[in-house]
Amino acid sequence: MKNYETVFILTPVLSEAQMKDTVGKFKKVLTDSGAKIINEENWGLQKLAYPIQHKITGFYQLFEFRAEPELIAQLETEYRRDEAVMRFLTTTLDKHAVIYNERRRKGAFKKNKEEDKEAIT
């Protein structure tokens, strides 16, 4: 099994319930195929870097998971079949990316404002 991270952008015309149903559908594709979801993040409605399908915003969702490589083709086929998905990207994580993601989840990279104030004075 390998470590993967997938991010997909859903169209902003979906209601909150439709967005959650769509995310749930992709999560089910992963779990039904034997993937172990390590982390799930909903980044919410974000401005896009450039318009996609005449839309300037989209709902961003991230899954970090462990799975067999054959699952990726199945997952990306599901992304392509769903009209709500505007863009997606799935990457394989190397050991350094896995360690980085663990540290990021634990808050190792969040700045402490009190420490910044002390450093200035």
Image (cartoon, rainbow, N blue to C red):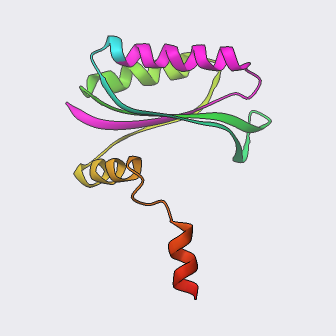
Locate residue 7, reporting x and y percent. Answer: 50, 36
Q: Is residue 111 left or right of residue 39?
A: right
Residue 71 quadrant: top left
Q: Is residue 81 left or right of residue 36?
A: right
Q: Which residues are magenta?
A: 1-30
Locate residue 115, reporting x and y percent. Answer: 50, 74
- In the displayed structure, 66 sits above or below 105; it is above
Residue 93 quadrant: top left
At a point 75% along the width and 33% down the height, the residue shown is: 53
Name the foreground residue: 96 vs 108. Answer: 108
At a point 23% along the width and 50% down the height, the residue shown is: 95
Total count of labels: 0
Q: Is residue 107 left or right of residue 4?
A: right
Residue 5 sits inside the magenta stretch: yes
Residue 70 quadrant: top left
At a point 50% along the width and 13% down the height, the residue shown is: 25
Q: Residue furthest left?
A: 1
Q: Residue furthest top?
A: 32
Which quadrant, please, contains the C terminus? bottom right
Q: Is residue 47 left or right of residue 61?
A: right
- In the displayed structure, 108 sits above or below 26; it is below
Locate residue 1, reporting x and y percent. Answer: 19, 30
Q: Residue furthest bottom?
A: 121
At a point 70% along the width and 45% down the height, the residue shown is: 48
Residue 80 sits inside the magenta stretch: no
